[in-house]
Image (tube, grey):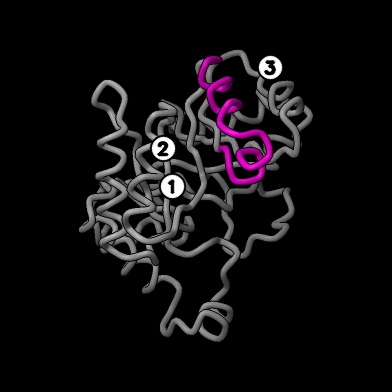
Amino acid sequence: MSKTMIALDFSDKESVMTFLDKFQEPVYVKVGMELTYAFGFEMIREIKKRGHQIFLDLKLHDIPNTVKNGMKNLAKLDVDMVNLHAAGGSSMMKAAIEGLNEGAINGKRPLCIAVTQLTSTSQEMMNEELRIAGSVQDTVIAYAKLAKESGLDGVVCSVHEARAIHEACGNDFLTVTPGIRLASDSKDDQKRVATPSFAKEEGCDYIVVGRSITKSEDPFQTYTEIEAIMEGK
């Protein structure tokens, strides 16, 4: 199973499919709000038909019953991973797992992970705008513990928090880390970023890579090189 998820941050379906045609093997992709809201679940089904694994990144956050029913329907898509906001609380997260189990295909539900703090969130923003006291890392670890207690499989976090989360929640608790850039790339709108090599050193289970692969002159070669780093080859 690939440890590198490719963020399909495109604005149209044709670009997605043209991009995926560049790959000689099935890969793990992240499909977010932009594509899902524009083209619906039919595109998800088409990507799955091509053999790719899908992390459906919709970040559910609502009352427990609504999230439960939403997750039940997402599970029927046979995607491999879904997520929600840990800030929704334990009852919501437990309800999400119930919904995924009810909608699971052949008894196998998607992995469910919780968003702790977005990688665009700075210390200043968290403290002053969101009115959450303390450090980003302390908040992330607290959310991770709550997610584990609620039955989730892991969290979305920054590379910089992955090691501490594994120490607090165990090595079997997954860390999925966006904000990955090659050393030569721009940070763009992300604040807490890191390279694939550093992610490997910090014990990240999965990394999410967008522009470094999608904007590459040879996306398959770049993906292969990053995956080799994550596999320790």
Seen at 30% across and 55% down, the residue is 93
Q: Nearer the viewer, residue 157 or 201?
A: 157
Let me know if residue 130 appears in the view.
yes
Relative vertical location of residue 116 with respect to residue 46 in this rendering, above or below: below
Please tell me whether mark 3 sits on a helix, a strand or a loop: loop
Q: Residue at x 58, y 35 (%)?
A: 6
User: Label 2: which residue?
Assistant: 81
Q: Give the residues drawn in magenta, as a range.
A: 31-50
Earlier sequence position, callout 3 versus callout 1: 3
Residue depicted at x 32% and y 65%: 89
Sequence order check, earlier mark of 1 and 2: 2
Q: Earlier in the sequence, mark 2 or mark 3?
A: 3
Location of mark 3 (residue): 21
Q: Secondary structure at mark 1?
A: strand
Report the Cα–Cα distance between label 3 and label 1. Answer: 25 Å
Q: Quadrant of residue 149?
A: bottom left
Q: Which residue is mark 1?
A: 176
- How far apart are the two marked residues, 2 and 3, measured between alpha carbons? 22 Å
Q: Most extreme residue toward the right, as rendered? A: 217
- In contact (CB < 8 Å): disc 1 and disc 2: yes
Q: Amino acid at mark 3?
A: Asp
Q: Amino acid at mark 1?
A: Val
Q: Would residue 112 be counted in the magenta stretch?
A: no
The amino acid sitting under disc 2 is Met
Residue 15 picture location, percent across and down: 76, 28
Crowd class of label 3 (few under 14; some 14 to 19; many from 20; radius 10 Å) = few
In this rendering, which labeled residue sits more in front, label 1 or label 2? 2
